[in-house]
Amino acid sequence: MDTVKYILTEDDMPRYWYNIVADLPFPLPPVIHPATGRPVGPDDLAPLFPMALIAQEVTTEREVEIPEPVRDVYRLWRPTPLFRARRLEEALGTPARIYYKYEGVSPAGSHKPNTAVAQAFYNKAEGVRRLTTETGAGQWGSALAMACRFFDLECKVYMVKVSYHQKPYRRVLMETWGAQVVPSPSPDTRAGRAVLAENPDSPGSLGIAISEAVEDAASRDDTKYSLGSVLNHVLLHQTVIGLEARKQLELAGDYPDVVVGCVGGGSNFAGLAFPFVADKLRGKSLRIIAVEPEACPSLTRGVYTYDFGDTAGTTPLLRMHTLGHTFVPAGIHAGGLRYHGMAPLVSLLYENGLIEARAEHQTAVFRAAVEFARAEGIVPAPESAHAIKVVVDLAVEAREAGRAQVILFNLSGHGHFDLAAYEQYLAGRLEDYAYPRERVEEALKNLPQVPAAGD
Ligand SMILES: *Cc1c(COP(=O)(O)O)cnc(C)c1O
């Protein structure tokens, strides 16, 4: 029988998130306060995050229990299916067995609700009434808008103004779930008003939107701030993906030779890969590959150092691969994954040789996306298509070598809100963007000085 979908029951859904920190043979560098050079403590973070999430940020426990109300919401779309890409294998004529974990079945269309729901739950449990966040194209904003609705929290999303006007459908999705969405820079915060005073026509940026969302949360007792990637607790919540995938591959009687995921801030990649990194740390032999855009290649070309998490330079300092916090990828880059840095946990694994990284050009990424859509039906998110590009390359290599590799990748979301980018590609208007060496060198000049601890 040629099974295509490996399905778990709701009862098979993981009861614990997997915390890779418990198994690391090397220490995770602390998050540093930019003024003192000392590790940040719970008090520094308390204005922005609930205590439960601050505790998860630093826990070394291997398993963190998933609260029952979070599992109840997960049940709306989890467990997600694991597909065997038989039609893609056939199209490529490859002996490789290709599996993909499909996170696009969530109501928001990506993996992001896995953490949004958990974050909304913990905030509600600690008496928070309202969450703020920033969003670019709107994927994170829509995940948080939905999660806030389920836990009866108000949600205010500062959406980068140019996206607010160019991509109205994600905004409508957020508003349908009851969130308030404002174009950033907005007149609602001091940070927004300052930008508007200087440039009333500012198109906005993620950096400005973060500053607004953080200021809003820090200035109100009933409000906290929520982040959709990069931080340890976000990666922790995403591990349901890999925990399910491991069980589903057991059903298939297979185990991956290669695990592939795209990386922006690192959360969907970590979610799939970390349970397999655990196997690798216990002696299993497999390759794990993170794929990023050539236009924003933080792992393959960045520096592993302390940098700000946001463009405005207001957050604590994270040890990560970074292109410099002032680096912003060019507007013509259509494939997402635009973050200047990388999750500290993903960076640490890369630095220690446990995972590999590759950077890909966008036309090759969209070519692979279309090839996938024509074989498997699903139109992938452009972000996810970075992983698909590498999977196709590996499958072709397997064909040429006559080797039956088992490949697993994360299809982190669907591309139904990204059809403008597909339209550009199909019309031949998408161009490759060479690695912006000079702009990265410029941004790296703005790396912060880390004060000696105790200054
Ligand atoms: C946000 C997003 C990404 C990139 O973020 P990560 O934190 O690196 O996962 C990738 N794929 C999809 C579908 C997304 O929405």
Image (spheres, rainbow, N blue to C red):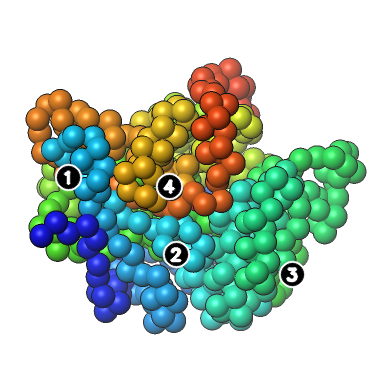
Any mark on residue 380, and which?
4
Q: CA distance from mark 1 to mark 3?
A: 52 Å
Q: Are marks 3 and 4 in contact (CB under 8 Å)?
A: no
Q: Amino acid at mark 2?
A: Ser
Q: Are marks 1 and 3 in contact (CB under 8 Å)?
A: no
Q: CA distance from mark 3 to mark 4?
A: 39 Å
Any mark on residue 97, and which?
1
Q: Are marks 2 and 3 in contact (CB under 8 Å)?
A: no
- Compared with 241, 339 (above or below) is above
Q: Viewer-proximal residue, 25 or 7?
A: 7
- Choose mark 1 or mark 3, whichever is in front: 1
- In terms of secondary structure, where does tag 3 sit? loop
Q: Earlier in the sequence, mark 1 or mark 3?
A: 1
Q: Amino acid at mark 3?
A: Arg
Res 150 quadrant in image? bottom right
Q: Viewer-proximal residue, 329 or 193?
A: 329
Label 4 beta carbon within 8 A of ligand 1: no
